[in-house]
Amino acid sequence: MPQDKVAINLESLGRAAEFSLLDGSQGVPAIDIGSLYKQLGVFTFDPGFMSTASCKSAITYIDGENGILLYRGYPIEQLAKQSSFLEVAYLLMNGELPGDDELLAFTDEINHHAMLHEALRSFFDGFHYDAHPMAMMVGVMGSLSAFYHSELNMEDPEHRRISAMRMLAKVPTIAAACYRHSVGWPFVYPRVDLGYCENFMNMMFSLPSQKFIGKDHYIDPVAVKALNILFILHADHEQNASTSTVRLASSTGANPYACVAAGISALWGPAHGGANEAVLSMLSEIGSVDRIPEFIAKAKDKNDPFRLMGFGHRVYKNFDPRATLIRETCHEVLEKYSDNDDPLFELALALEQYALKDEYFIEKKLYPNVDFYSGIIYKALKIPEEMFTVMFVIARTAGWVSHWLEMMAEPSHRIGRPRQIYTGYEKRDYIPTEER
């Protein structure tokens, strides 16, 4: 069967060329324009990369029109309901679900690498007590490149695998340490007898006088289930801004810890990982249930700067499959943990119902998304708002290291180097100071 071609004819320049159409295993085909400049002497212009495929990847597939999200071919709905976060992390990194022995070995290795070098503890003392946890996450993750650099051979697949395991294992320990530094509490070491999510909660909330998880005090299964689901849903999302940042930094051959630190920086933005924190800020601005119609009207007004955060998605045009799953979890958590005296939860549920029934939101397909529900869940679990994006980091690290491993294994990966349309001055001569 002949391969499809795309012809481009530049009549004004008298040039024409054909380009191959590349098909993946499923999804939208892409035009291979790698030789576009060589053949036609022009670049493409695609702000925000709305129509650009930057790489080939076998990790995650998204069909935004039909609300489909697959990790290594497995529907997100099945993984969220039947799997655990570590099992999903193994899947993303290795391509297949683990057997019992493989998962046990994977979990043991995660536990082995969860400790932080003792010298790193003093690194936290350099941060002010009120430093944002994300600022600390960027700094501490980047500093790991100083601890694991001389022994790292980027050409060795086993060295790369160990680096990925270290990042996945240490990120909840670093996250909990960031929180405890901000409140002046002593650090808590990870425990090998606890699961990934339980360990994180224990490191976050244990007090010297009372372990958060001890013989007579176990974390509620509802909270563990919620964290597992949130981490699974946030584990990867194809070539988003932070994953693309990790890939671009990695294309230079930079240390992987520095590359993931760059991804954390990208995730910090309110348009990306900070969206769930912005949802809580929006709810605080609305204030009460009786003001919902007023703010809905403001959201519909194109001339009003107010934005309704946590609704709709750039990729999913009909519905976000993650939101459908997390909504059920959100209601379970609120039923168990919500403070009846906190009006924010009542406001959130009222806003959800209002938007789901409003014709404008239905027509525009502005449904509550994963950010809307995740922020509410974290608040109900007593996770501070400034830690919301840090929670995203813990989950997304599984995706970042998977993409890093995939890219570094490609024999012909190249450094990323986007082009531009120059809009500055044409060549001009230097003018001496006295003549300006």
Image (cartoon, rainbow, N blue to C red):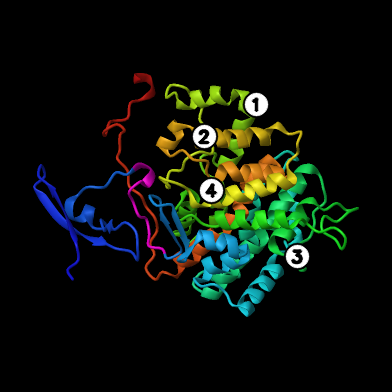
The reply to whether residue 396 is in sight is yes
Question: Where are the magenta residues, as a range?
Answer: 47-57
Residue at image mark 1:
288
Task: Determine whether, in the image, residue 70 is placed left or right of residue 99.
Answer: left
Residue at image mark 4:
323
Foreground: disc 4 or disc 2? 2
Q: CA distance from mark 1 to mark 2?
A: 15 Å
Q: CA distance from mark 4 to mark 2?
A: 14 Å
Instruction: Determine the residue located farthest toward the right in the rendered image.
Output: 209
- Tell me which label, 4 or 2, sits earlier in the chain: 4
> Which label belongs to residue 194?
3
Residue 40 pos. (x, y %): 17, 51
Residue under the image location 78 percent in, 56 percent down? 219
Q: Is residue 292 above or below residue 40?
A: above
Q: CA distance from mark 1 to mark 3?
A: 40 Å
- Tell me which label, 4 or 3, sits earlier in the chain: 3
* Amino acid type, callout 1: Ser
In magenta segment, residue 355: no
Determine whether the residue tagged by mark 3 lies in a helix, strand or loop.
loop
Residue 137 pos. (x, y %): 64, 50
* Amino acid type, callout 3: Leu
